[in-house]
Image: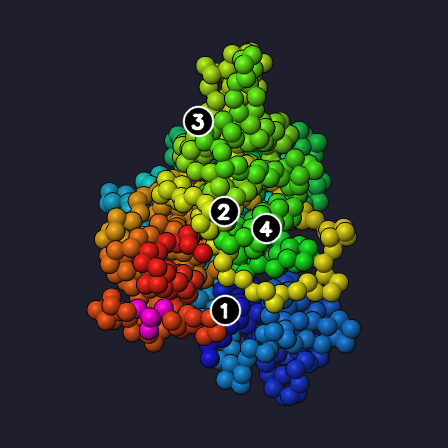
């Protein structure tokens, strides 16, 4: 038996070595006691003893904050140290404050046998060894010298796929994350050699997620390489992109004032606080020079030892931490700062950090359960990733499964309700035949009568409301032909583009179509605001209309056909009438797309994009037989979904791709020919993968596929599959084809 994913993935986001050591000492204490729960005090002491023993042997260990020796750690600090990994593993561990005991969650414990405990111990040891080894083998000096020696020559070679890209985007960030003073809870590390082409000034940045998640704004630590590669500068710097939106002169004034202010409030010991940094003469290099607060310079061929480099980095990060915690977070900055920065805040609404997304989604799930509703495992994560990839999602399934309610509950959890106008339910009518039913029309007097969707768009773009998320639920969307009444919106959605840091679309209503000046002022420039998210619900039965590929290419289709009726509200958990503990106010950037074109993300996630595209090409070769293969629009949408999933660490890569096959590929399949049968069989073979133990003999199954699809019959345990969701749906579609002579994703 392999370990549950919740356990096998728990070390993926490392938090120093504390998580691995905690699991090891807890397992040891559980084994000795023979109990399901043990004293937290004993676990803390065993945790401390481990580090003392390793330090005594002269082995490398993470040091406790502010101390050189673990033997000097007082009980109060030890408790804080151990609480950190306990909190990080709260999905696996359970603390009981009443009797001060700790153990595995009951549901986790019930999944583990004796062999699994041994496997868990081996996993923790393996991760701990890899963690320590990474620190001991990492040579920052070697990397910096190598970059300066080879970058100029590399710029003469093709940009795409160059090893330096991997070095900056993955190798160096991964190595720095292992540094004990760069706690992943607080710091985001990223690097770049350019976006689509070589940058003159490549960089490697450390960002405190509590104040900034992007190098476009805020303050952060960054290595900046001179254009001629004569030197590299370790700097405390500021983002330049957002300030420049107000104009270059105004931006430089703001950056210089901010630099002087920060130089006056933190010591910046062992750093140069002058303006002598030399990157290049103009352009971004000049911007970076103006934005630099303080720096340490390393000349090519004379970069100091790793020990000195790490000491310098730790010093700069410590200055950065003092600034963040002592001034920014405590809001003790001067009135001048508040006045100057305020004008940029509206331009650069800060999304929550990537590391916080899973926490917010968990709170949304908790809210839904408190309301007495249950949805399939990881549906909320899938729903979120789908909305993030494209602001139009379809929820499909049999009637009564809670599709409309899910939209309402998700919106409610994010502060969007019918009462405040941020949630709107639009009932689609069977007689809708053109966009006027949604957008509006001119009456006989020539006055424009706005449709329900137009009213939402007008409200969402009002000053002071543009940061709030607005949700529109188009209920029973396919009672009418979607292509008839929704065509204008589908076309306009494809015109999304970046304008001054915001997403804009072409206009929905032209001035030419409006006769009255008041209507022209109110509706003439109307487009789809970036803070509006459209969700359609559809019932999959014989009374509704099918979707064309034009619609399917532009949306993720989430299916609600597999439900467990034996789910009941837990007593005391449903609080329809009680007060809901709301999430902190979250602006629309939580859901808004960060990428519109693949080039926006390719530089940072090229390997994932290439790997995902290779998977799609394998599927596309099968789909060509029935002319159901996909194009660039679908490829890009799937890649965006996979990128967001990797950023937010929500699902495994195979599980995420499984959802995308189910939601973006399979809805396109229908027909009655033998070629459709062949495609379904090939796809189910691919979905099963090599480890399923199921043999798919195409020649035999072309005549009778019952031996294959019957494995998913009710009451049976389906075979293990690489893409289990897609495999189950394909088995159902194959059965419909054999029994009815026709199959479609949309048949319930």
Query: Mark 3 or 2, which is nearer the eye?
Result: 2
User: Are discs 4 and 1 less than 8 Å apart at CB?
Assistant: no
User: Are discs 4 and 3 less than 8 Å apart at CB?
Assistant: no
Instruction: Decide: is 660 above or below 476.
Output: below
Query: Mark 4 or 2, which is nearer the eye?
Result: 2
- Nearer the N terminus, badge 1 or badge 2? 1
- From the image, tell me which residue sits under label 4: 406
Query: Mark 4 or 1, which is nearer the eye?
Result: 4
Q: Which mark is residue 506?
A: 3
Element type at mark 2 = strand
Pick the front one: 365 or 113:
365
User: Are discs 4 and 2 less than 8 Å apart at CB?
Assistant: no
Element type at mark 4 = helix
- Nearer the N terminus, badge 3 or badge 2? 3
Query: Which stretch is magenta?
Result: 705-709
- From the image, tell me which residue sits under label 2: 538
Element type at mark 3 = loop
- From the image, tell me which residue sits under label 1: 5
What secondary structure is the stretch in magenta mostly built from? helix
- Residue 258 is left or right of residue 676, and the answer is right
Q: At 56% from the left edge and 12% from the top edge, which residue is drawn?
A: 445
Query: Mark 4 or 3, which is nearer the eye?
Result: 4
How many angstroms separate mark 4 from mark 1 (CA)?
A: 26 Å
- Within 10 Å of disc 4 (Cα), the crowding (few <14, some 14-19, many 20+) is some
How many angstroms separate mark 4 from mark 3 (CA)?
A: 30 Å
Pick the front one: 640 or 604:
640
Residue 462: percent from left, percent from top: 61, 27
- Residue 394 is left or right of residue 77, and the answer is left
Asked whether residue 16 is in view, the answer is no
Is 367 one of the magenta-colored residues? no
């Amino acid at each position: 038996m392999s370990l549950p994913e919740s356990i096998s993935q728990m070390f993926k986001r490392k938090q120093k070595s504390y998580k691995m050591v905690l699991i090891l000492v807890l397992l040891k204490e559980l084994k000795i006691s023979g109990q399901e729960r043990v004293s937290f005090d004993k676990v803390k002491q065993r945790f401390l003893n481990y580090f003392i023993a390793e330090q005594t042997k002269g082995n490398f260990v993470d040091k406790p904050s502010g101390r050189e020796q673990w033997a000097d750690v007082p009980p109060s600090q030890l408790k804080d140290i151990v609480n950190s990994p306990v909190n990080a593993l709260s999905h696996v561990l359970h603390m009981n404050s009443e009797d001060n005991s700790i153990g595995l969650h009951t549901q986790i414990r019930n999944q583990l046998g004796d062999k699994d405990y041994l496997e868990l111990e081996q996993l923790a040891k393996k991760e701990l060894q890899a963690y320590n080894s990474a620190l001991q083998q990492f040579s920052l000096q070697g990397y910096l010298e190598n970059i300066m020696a080879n970058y100029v020559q590399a710029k003469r070679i093709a940009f795409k796929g160059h090893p330096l890209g991997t070095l900056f985007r993955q190798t160096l960030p991964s190595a720095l994350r292992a540094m004990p003073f760069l706690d992943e809870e607080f710091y985001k590390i990223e690097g770049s050699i350019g976006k689509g082409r070589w940058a003159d000034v490549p960089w490697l940045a450390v960002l405190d997620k509590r104040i900034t998640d992007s190098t476009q704004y805020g303050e952060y630590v960054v290595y900046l390489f001179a254009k001629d590669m004569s030197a590299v500068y370790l700097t405390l710097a500021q983002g330049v992109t957002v300030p420049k939106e107000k104009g270059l002169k105004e931006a430089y004034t703001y950056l210089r004032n901010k630099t002087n202010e920060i130089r006056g409030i933190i010591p910046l010991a062992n750093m140069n606080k002058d303006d002598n940094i030399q990157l290049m003469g103009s352009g971004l290099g000049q911007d970076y020079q103006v934005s630099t607060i303080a720096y340490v310079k390393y000349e090519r061929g004379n970069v100091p030892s790793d020990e000195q480099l790490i000491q310098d980095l730790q010093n700069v990060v410590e200055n950065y931490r003092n600034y963040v915690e002592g001034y920014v977070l405590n809001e003790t900055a001067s009135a001048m700062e508040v006045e100057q920065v305020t004008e940029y805040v509206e331009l650069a609404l800060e999304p929550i950090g990537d590391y916080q997304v899973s926490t917010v989604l968990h709170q949304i799930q908790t809210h839904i359960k408190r309301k007495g509703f249950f949805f399939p495992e990881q549906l909320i994560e899938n729903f979120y990733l789908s909305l993030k990839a494209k602001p139009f999602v379809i929820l499909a399934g049999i009637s009564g499964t809670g599709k409309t309610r899910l939209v309402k509950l998700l919106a409610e959890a994010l502060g969007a309700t019918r009462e405040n106008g941020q949630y709107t339910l639009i009932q689609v009518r069977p007689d809708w035949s053109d966009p006027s039913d949604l957008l509006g029309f001119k009456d006989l007097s020539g006055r424009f009568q706005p449709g329900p969707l137009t009213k939402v768009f007008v409200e969402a773009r009002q000053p002071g409301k543009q940061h709030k998320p607005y949700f529109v639920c188009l209920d029973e969307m396919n009672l009418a032909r979607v292509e008839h009444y929704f065509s204008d919106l589908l076309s306009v959605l494809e015109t999304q583009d970046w304008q001054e840091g915001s997403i804009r679309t072409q206009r929905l209503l032209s001035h030419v179509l409006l006769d009255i000046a008041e209507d022209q002022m109110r509706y003439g420039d109307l487009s789809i605001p970036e803070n509006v998210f459209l969700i359609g619900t559809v019932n999959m039965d014989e009374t509704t209309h099918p979707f064309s590929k034009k619609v399917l290419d532009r949306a993720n289709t989430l299916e609600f056909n597999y439900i467990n009726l034996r789910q009941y509200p837990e007593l005391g958990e449903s609080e329809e009438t009680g007060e809901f503990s709301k999430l902190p106010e979250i602006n629309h950037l939580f859901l808004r797309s960060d990428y519109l074109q693949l080039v926006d993300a390719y530089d940072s996630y090229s390997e994932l994009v290439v790997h995902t595209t290779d998977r799609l090409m394998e599927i596309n070769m099968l789909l060509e037989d029935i002319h159901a293969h996909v194009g660039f629009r679908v490829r890009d949408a799937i890649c965006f979904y996979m990128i967001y999933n990797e950023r937010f660490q929500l699902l495994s890569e195979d599980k995420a791709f499984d959802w995308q096959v189910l939601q973006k590929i399979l809805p396109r399949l229908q027909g009655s020919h033998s070629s459709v049968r062949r495609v379904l069989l090939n796809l189910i073979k691919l979905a099963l993968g090599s480890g399923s133990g199921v043999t798919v003999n195409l020649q035999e199954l072309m005549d009778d596929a019952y031996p294959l699809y019957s494995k998913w019959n009710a009451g049976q345990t389906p075979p293990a599959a690489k893409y289990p969701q897609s495999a189950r749906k394909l088995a159902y579609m194959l059965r419909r084809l054999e029994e009815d002579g026709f199959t479609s994703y949309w048949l319930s």
